[in-house]
Each structure stands twice: as structure tokens, then as C-alpha cells.
Image: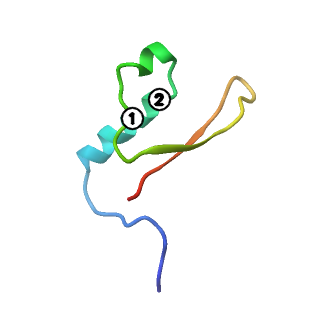
Amino acid sequence: MLSAAQQLTPGFDKLEYANLMKVSAQMGDSTYRAGVPVPAGYVMQYRSPVMGLDNLWELWMTDS
């Protein structure tokens, strides 16, 4: 059976964790995110409108 889903590997991936922390930092204000670069290969595809109690979400994609 073919699947287009992400291929998971067992264990903890330090590089993946560091990249996701950098992506998550991009939602902070401009002074906070200024010192945190967007990891190579990650592109923001969508940012939701602000709703409720100033809540929003972003969709980030990478080749892998």
C-alpha cells in the first residue's frame, strides 16, 4: 500500500527538534524572532486570521 504520509523513524532527532523550535519562534514579535533564523528548507505556506483571544496558527512546509 502506497502512502504519501511522512516517513517516521524511531528515536529523537535533535536537528528536527531544533528546526521546529526555530519555526515556532517565528510566531513571536519582530524583536524576538530577529535573532532566530528560519531553518533552511522551511517555508510558511499559510497564516490564519486572528480569532478569539488573539489566537492564530501557521502552516510551515519542508521538502522532507
Amino acid found under the numbered disc labelled 1: Val
Picture quarter containing residue 36?
A: top left
Which structural element holds mark 1? Answer: loop
* Residue 31 in picture, x, y percent from top left: 45, 13
Amino acid found under the numbered disc labelled 2: Gln
Residue named by callout 1 = 38
* Residue 23 in picture, x, y percent from top left: 43, 36
Asked whether, in this view, residue 55 is left or right of residue 58, the answer is right
For the C terminus, the quadrant is bottom left
Q: Residue at position x 40%, y 57% from top? A: 63
Q: Residue at position x 67%, y 38% from top? A: 48
What color scheme is it? rainbow
Asked whether, in this view, residue 46 is left or right of residue 33, the answer is right
Badges 1 and 2: C-beta atoms under 8 Å apart?
yes
Q: How many marks?
A: 2
Q: Residue furthest bottom?
A: 1
Q: Residue at position x 47%, y 29% from top? A: 26
Q: Residue at position x 66%, y 29% from top? A: 55
- For marks 1 and 2, the one nearer the N-term is 2
Residue named by callout 2 = 26
Picture quarter containing residue 21?
A: top left
- The answer for how far apart the CA atoms under marks 1 and 2 are is 7 Å
* Structural crowding at the residue carrying mark 2, measured as other residues with C-alpha within 10 Å and reported as few (<14), some (14–19) or many (≥20): some
In this rendering, which labeled residue sits more in front, label 1 or label 2?
1
* Residue 25 in picture, x, y percent from top left: 43, 28
Up the image or down, 6 lies above or below 48; here it is: below
Which structural element holds mark 2? Answer: loop
Up the image or down, 20 lies above or below 51; here it is: below
Q: Depth check: 61 or 21 in front?
A: 61
* Residue 43 in picture, x, y percent from top left: 47, 44
Up the image or down, 30 lies above or below 62; here it is: above
Q: Residue furthest right?
A: 52
